[in-house]
Amino acid sequence: MKYQIIGKNIEVTDAIKAVLEEKLSRMDKYFVIDDSVLCRAVVRAYKVGAKVEVTIFTKQMDFRAEVRDNDLYAAVDFAIDKLEGQMRKLKTRMDRSKAAMGLGRSVVFENLEEQLEEEEDEEVVRTKSIYLEPMTLDEAITRMEALGHTFFMYLDSEDDQVSVAYKRLEGGYGVIQAENKLK
């Protein structure tokens, strides 16, 4: 796995880099490791505490964890625990649903392109463009859980409608579908 460690408001020392790489190497067992697997860790320092954002990019899907804690090293541990929890949940979900997805397959899952744009309007802080891949609701929920997000936009393979799967506050999942069809 390739590591990219970025510091925001903090200098990434050799000690921080060594700890991050050692702890992130625990994730190697979950992936077929090749040159395409990238692990990006962003470490941010605040007046009180630190935040660690870890994103693992694979051909099939991306995994992400974000943790803020008073201790940088504790935040790293919590982020790794969160990622491992996502992996266990994903494996259980895939086993239960008998989905045609496996972590070892080389299916193109790179459907998110992140674009950071400077806008004059302060409310828009991030813009993403996505390619909507046809998939089932189960696959969309699996990807949403793997990313650690509360919603996921996709193209429903059963009826070709733009859909959003989301996690309900009361528990369970919901789906929002566009009424207009794609041409």
Image (cartoon, grey):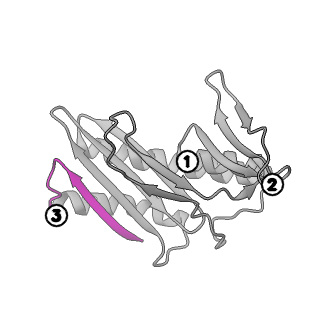
Which of the two labelled residues, at mark 1 and mark 2, occupies the earlier sequence position?
1
Q: Nearer the viewer, residue 123 or 58?
A: 123
Disc 2 marks which residue?
A: 157
The stretch in magenta equals: 1-14
Disc 1 marks which residue?
A: 86
* Residue at figure coordinates x 68%, y 39% from the top left: 165
What amino acid is at disc 1?
Gln
* Residue at figure coordinates x 61%, y 59% from the top left: 131
**Which label belongs to residue 14?**
3
Query: In the rendering, at what x and y percent does residue 62 appear?
Result: 53, 58
Q: Nearer the viewer, residue 27 or 106?
A: 106
Q: Secondary structure at mark 1?
A: helix
* Quarter that holds the N terminus: bottom left
Circle 1 or circle 2, nearest the eye: 2
Residue 124 in which image quadrant:
top left
Residue 60 among those drawn in magenta: no
Question: Up-down: is 133 above or below 48?
Answer: below
Q: Nearer the viewer, residue 162 or 66?
A: 162
Q: Secondary structure at mark 3?
A: helix
Query: In the rendering, at what x and y percent does residue 178 appear?
Result: 74, 39
